[in-house]
Amino acid sequence: MTELLSHFKPGEFIGLVAVAGGLLIPIFAVLGGAWTRARMIALKREMIERGMSADEIHTVLTAGTKSCPANRRERHSERV
């Protein structure tokens, strides 16, 4: 491995690292998004298996987000 790297000039090595890094970032972003989606689907299935209603699942999934009605009421009461 060091023999292969010793053939590169410093500028070429920096270019290689820049290109490799530029390709790895979007790959990890796509993989992370897919992993997050898979975990969300697994969570939904688990809640369905536990017998939770659609409204309860929606409440759990939107808790802590701006779209959650309870959070909007809390923020509104803080302003008043």
Image (spheres, helix red, strand yellow):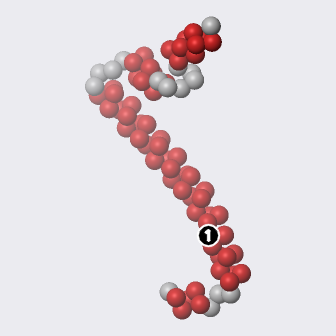
**Residue lying farthest to the top in this orientation:** 80
- Residue 69 appears in the picture as rendered: no
Q: Relative to 40, is 5 above or below?
A: below
Amino acid type shown at disc 1: Ala
Q: In the image, what residue occupies the spot 42% across and 36% down?
A: 41
Instruction: State the image coordinates of residue 65 (x, y, percent, origin top left).
Output: 53, 26
Q: In the image, what residue occupies the spot 65% across and 87% down?
A: 8
Q: Secondary structure at mark 1?
A: helix
Left or right: where 5 falls relative to 58: right
Q: Relative to 57, is 74 above or below?
A: above
Instruction: State the image coordinates of residue 9 (x, y, percent, origin top left).
Output: 68, 87
Task: Please rate how many residues cluster around mark 1, counting C-alpha atoms within 10 Å: few if below 14, some from 14 to 19, many from 20.
Answer: few
Instruction: State the image coordinates of residue 3 (x, y, percent, origin top left).
Output: 54, 92
Q: Relative to 70, is 34 above or below?
A: below
**Residue lying farthest to the left in this orientation:** 50
- Residue 3 appears in the picture as rendered: yes
Q: In the image, what residue occupies the spot 57% across and 21% down?
A: 67
The residue that mark 1 highlights is: 20
Task: Using the rendered view, name the quadrant where residue 46 is placed.
Answer: top left
Left or right: where 7 falls relative to 34: right
Left or right: where 70 falls relative to 79: left
Q: In the image, what residue occupies the spot 62% across and 91% down?
A: 7
Q: Relative to 16, is 2 above or below?
A: below
Circle count: 1
**Quadrant location of the C terminus in the rendered image:** top right
